[in-house]
Image (spheres, rainbow, N blue to C red):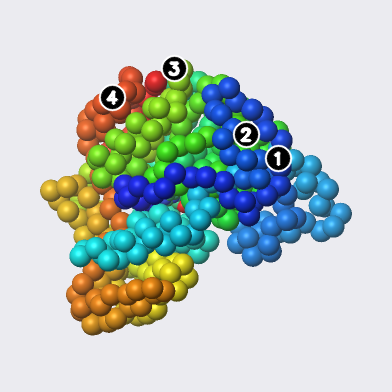
Amino acid sequence: MPGHRSTPTSPPSSNPSHATAAPAAGSPRTSNTRPPASRRTVQAAELPAPFQQANGWARPAAADTDRADAATGTLAFVQQAFPDGAAEREELVRGLLTPHAQVSPKYFYDMLGSHLFEAITELPEYYPTRTEATIFEQHALEMAERAGTGAVLIDLGAGNCAKAARLFPALRPAQYVALDISADFLRATLVGLQQQHPGLPMVGLGADLCAPLDLPPEVRAGRRLFFYPGSSIGNFDPSGARALLDRLRDAAQPGDGVLIGVDLLKDRTQLVNAYDDALGVTAAFNRNVLVHLNRVLGANFVLGDWCHVAEFDERAGCIRMYLECRRDVEVHWAGGGRAFHAGERIHTEDSYKYRREAFSALLEEAGFREPVCWTDPQGWFAIFHARV
Ligand SMILES: C[S@@+](CC[C@H](N)C(=O)[O-])C[C@H]1O[C@@H](n2cnc3c(N)ncnc32)[C@H](O)[C@@H]1O
């Protein structure tokens, strides 16, 4: 579900705070424009305990550390997104000050937001994850036959990497590259995953998909399969989705492909319930963006002043999420602020739903060839493969 509107951010660059050299595999398809200080090899024992515990990965005892280190020896982590908090603050303030205030859904995903999203995927109302998993289970071998085995598997918005990991046996990737804006969560996840798959080279990329795709030299040369599950592409409006597909097309070469999960149009009640569950987990996920705003901007949003709203825009075929103010409030942040009247909203997420033909057409317009899709018996969700 959540992901992003097509708000552009500044292009990524190096983050000097992540400084330790890691072995560069070197790729003739990419140029090393970032100083080596932006990448490092992550070892399990380096992670702060909360990151390890949060992912169910126990910190190794001293005697286990060498084994853990050996197992994670090939894991490199490259941090590209938000090297400079100023750009993030500027984007957030700009969104808050527009007449219809908005915050890009990419800001849902701090450590807590990533965990809340995992909880959402367990909810009875949230059919996409389960449905998509069933399609993968049933058609993984056909997908591998079509997409080919032995590619570099590039997981966009990888989250807990679970979907890609389940496809490893069928796709047998030469390398696994996991990209996500929620860098701490991704880093911790990858340490555990690398231990489970010590023979599979892995690269973590803390990057923003709204920025140009800049694959670092750690990403191997060779055939690439861009994997974008979870219907995250629906978080872009159709022109933003097209722009993202264009960026993938530009980063791809003949022989490469995309494997993309897309949520399909369906009954309004089923859609709304998926984004407004009875337990209130999606509401907590939505409100967590205010925690992010308070932290990053030094703002004083009071969570109890805001309620979660999910609506289906039938004309656009889109679920829209908002935070609606319960009373008149004045919110302040470092250097500014704004008043919100009771009933005023902050737009936090769009989730566009597609018809199969429309998404196939979008792939073709972006220059991908021969799109095919697999779906579930109810026709709720589709996974598309297309070639370059
Ligand atoms: C809906 S979750 C999907 C997670 C996982 N791929 C799945 O299918 O379960 C969206 C993921 O994309 C990441 N994400 C959201 N916006 C992003 C952005 N602009 N750039 C990179 N990652 C982003 C989030 O951190 C989150 O892990």
Question: Amino acid type of disc 1?
Answer: Ala
Disc 2 designates what residue? Answer: 218
Residue drawn at (45%, 74%) of the image: 298
Disc 4 designates what residue? Answer: 364
Q: Nearest to the eye among marks 4 and 1: give it.
A: 1
Task: Say above or below: 371 vs 191.
Answer: above
Residue drawn at (54%, 24%) of the image: 29
Which of the 4 quarters of the picture holds residue 173?
A: top right
Q: Are marks 2 and 4 in contact (CB under 8 Å)?
A: no
Label 2 – label 1 distance at C-alpha: 9 Å
Label 4 – label 3 distance at C-alpha: 15 Å
**Residue density around tag 4, few if under 14, some if 14–19, many if 20 or more, within 10 Å:** some
Q: Are marks 4 and 1 in contact (CB under 8 Å)?
A: no
Residue 205 horizontal/vertical position (percent): 55, 43
Sequence order check, earlier mark of 4 and 1: 1
Sequence order check, earlier mark of 3 and 1: 1
Disc 1 designates what residue? Answer: 22
Q: Nearer the viewer, residue 192 or 89?
A: 89
Sequence order check, earlier mark of 4 and 3: 3
**Residue density around tag 1, few if under 14, some if 14–19, many if 20 or more, within 10 Å:** many
